[in-house]
Amino acid sequence: MNNGKSIASHDLLRGLRVAITGGTSGLGLALVREMASRRAHVAFVARNRERVTAVALESPGTHGIVGDVSRKEEIHPIAMQILGRLGGIDVLVNSASSLGPTPLALLGDTECEDFELALATNVLGPFRLTKALLGALTASAREGRAAVVLNVSSDAAISAYPGWGAYGTSKAALHHMSRIWHEELANEGVRFLSADPGDMDTPLHTLAVPDADPVTLKRPAVAATEFADLIAAAIARPTATDALSAHATLARNVEAGTT
Amino acid sequence: MIAASEPRQRPLDARLLVLDRKGKIVHLPRADLVDFLEPSDLVIANDAATLPASFAGFHEPTGARIEVRLAGRRSLANDDVTRFTAVVFGAGDFHTRTEDRPLPPRLVAGDRLVLGPLIATVEATLEHPRLVALCFAGSPDAIWEGLARHGRPVQYAHVPTPLALGDVWTPIAAGPVAFEPPSAGFVLDWRNLAAMRARGIEFATITHAAGLSSTGDAELDARLPFDEPYAIPQATLAAIRRAKRQRRRIVAIGTTVVRALEHAALRHGSVRAGNGIATQRIGPRTRLRVVDAIVSGAHEPGSSHHELLRAFLDDRTLRRVTDALIAHGYRTHEFGDSVLIARQAANTARHRSNSRIALATPLHV
């Protein structure tokens, strides 16, 4: 935080309209705090009303929205509240994630419903929410503002870890979808990032690996700082085509920071 | 014309009637729209997303069931969601034709309306028993949540199945400020926008709070459209100025775009960027300063949308268009077929000779 580069990227997010899903837990919560501290206008989405209220109280000026991105019928009401409260959107972070079966299960032991939940939360939710917000994101780009979507990926999207079948498959789909969105919307000025925050000390990780030693895990606040810098770097880049080539490198950098 | 009753924005069999500048009519699949634009066109659409503006509830003093349809707001500001004008119906819902809906109980200032989680107070009635000024209780955040959770899209009896919010958001929908969808924008999809770019057609947007298209009450309908706030981005203004300078056509996607751009040009003769409130009616006596062509729905004579087309065409040509729409079974209303109408050469010549404002005067050569 003390070097000049970080201070510059702090300023890049000031005043931006940022929406974060999964905003009351783990990385999403850390991102709400990080973005609010960088003076972005933040709206966040999560399922539990009490937790939404508590996080909004803790970070004054943020707007809490109660909603479940895995449910199709809630997407437009969520999108409408994001756009209504922020007056538009410059950055969308799809952070809400489901592991699928908990405890983790081999694919052969995974119930279809648990697999569907992982897909609904990690693939369909980001797809639908991005689609509902696409008009606002492209409007932002046309007006010369930022238009960035960051999808939270995982090394399980790339590596085949036994026991992570539903989660890994869904994150692989999300990662690939991000790349296709990026290709299709480069001309509209919307940039897509897909990045792996690394293994973090979060409620989701505890569900997946209950006996992990927290000391070996990254703090979500550290990952949130890296992700905020990643978004700032994408915004600082002059054209979407540049962001495309930068995408892999930046994502690797974030991953590299975790090992 | 037949009412389109399926809530599909881009049915594969959607049709487009094209009236060119010389008055020639062509019928096409609407998917071919981009082919019938000119490579130098500037296409401008309304990017307003649609509020779920219909609220079921009751009138607290009498307990009578009512439906409230939000109909207007004084600005587009995202925290300015406390005060609305609204049309109030008695018991019932969209399944009953608006013409047949009962009046609400007598509404007086101070009456509370309970609309699901939202509480609205009647501030005044506006010279009609159905039309009121409302004030919602609560913070903007709470009001936005109440609107999102309890509101339903305004809909009419010609679409029998309940609409979801996604059914009425155009693909380019951004700020949720419209009370009914700017449905001409249903023709747009991302493939079309890419095709326009590939042909060198420029695309820009304005935001205009499209209001109710009908109340079912002749006296109120005669007052439509109500005042509608709009915003014109700087980038759109720059695109308009470029197009005017280079004598390129400006094609409006929908009547709301015409209303906003022409209103913005009223005072100074050319468009200004920023916020405004469109108060004017557009009809046969309107001199169009900005827009050269319009993509619109297949509207029936008598509607304000149909009236607006009279600014583009003389009555004889408009009659020919209407006859062709009827003869060819075009579907009307928001999910219906479309027309692409270029302002007629005769009208343009007359306008041009009357105009002294070169920048604001489109030239068709």
Image (cartoon, coloured by chain):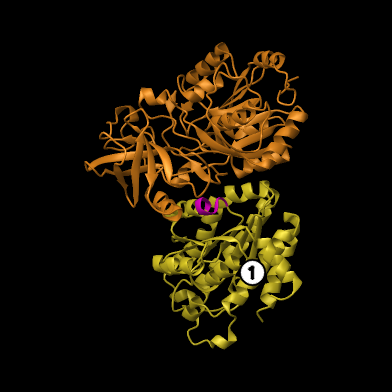
Chain colours: A yellow, B orange
Q: Which residue is mark 1?
A: A227
Q: Place residue A8 in its image quadrant.
A: bottom right
Secondary element under disc 1, as helix, strand or loop, is helix
Image quarter in which the N terminus of chain A is found: bottom right
Residue at the spot x=66%, y=53% of the render? A190
What number of labels is visible?
A: 1
Residue at the spot x=76%, y=19% of the render? B365
Q: Place residue A181 in its image quadrant.
A: bottom right
- Dominant secondary structure, magenta: helix
* Name of the residue lying farthest toward the top: B316
**Residue A36 at what x, y percent from top left?**
58, 66
Residue A241 in view in this figure: yes
* A93, A251: nearer the viewer: A93
The span picked out in magenta is A83-88
Residue A159 in view in this figure: no
Q: Is residue B220 magenta?
A: no
**Residue B21 at what x, y percent from top left?**
66, 19
